[in-house]
Image: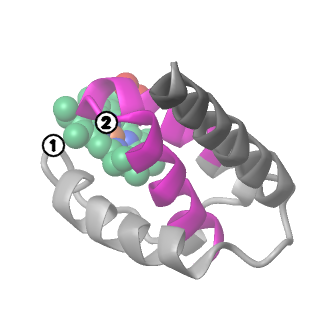
């Protein structure tokens, strides 16, 4: 039970953290940004050339990453980190 509480509390924290940095121009969490940069390098050039983060706007990257998340088989965390990296680099 205690574990479940901890999991639920962390999930809520993550959700809150996510919703607070999801709106476009806020500074991304530096750790998410760093993890995202690595996950992006590891995953996003497997099937096609890398697109420059500057090629798309924040809202476009959001749609692209949700689509590519399925193709690349990313976890939700990896997808959020990659999005943080892309939106923080364009
Ligand atoms: C399993 C293979 C695969 C992986 C991994 C993958 N993609 Fe893709 N990607 C595709 C395919 C296939 C298309 C074109 C068809 C489509 O849109 O589904 C595409 C299209 C795209 C496009 C639009 C076409 C363009 O270049 O303008 C972008 C942008 C893109 N991917 C970015 C990413 C990013 C960012 C990642 C990492 C999160 C990623 N892709 C990982 C297969 C992949």
Residue 35 percent location from the top left of the image: 38, 69
Residue 4 percent location from the top left of the image: 52, 23
Quadrant assignment for ligand 1: top left
Residue toward you, 74 or 47 = 74
Q: Is residue 88 magenta?
A: yes
Which of the image's four quarters has the C terminus? bottom right
Does mark 2 have its CB less than 8 Å from ligand 1?
Answer: yes
Q: Write down the region rendered in magenta.
A: 62-90
Residue 71 percent location from the top left of the image: 29, 26
- Identify the main secondary structure in magenta: helix
Q: Can you say whether 89 is above or below 45 in the image?
A: below
| Residue located 50% across and 41% down the image | 65
Q: Is residue 59 visible?
A: no
Check disc 2 and report the residue beneath it: 74
Q: Is residue 61 left or right of residue 77?
A: right
Mark nearer the N terminus (2 vs 1) = 1
| Residue located 53% across and 49% down the image | 80
């Amino acid at each position: 039970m205690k574990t479940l509480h901890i999991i639920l509390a962390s999930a809520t924290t993550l959700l809150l953290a996510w919703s607070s940095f999801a709106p476009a121009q806020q500074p991304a969490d530096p750790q998410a940004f760093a993890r995202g940069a690595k996950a992006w390098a590891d995953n996003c050039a497997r099937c096609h050339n890398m697109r420059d983060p500057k090629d798309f706007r924040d809202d476009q990257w959001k749609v692209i990453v949700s689509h590519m998340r399925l193709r690349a088989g990313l976890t939700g965390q990896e997808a959020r980190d990659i999005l943080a990296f892309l939106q923080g680099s364009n």
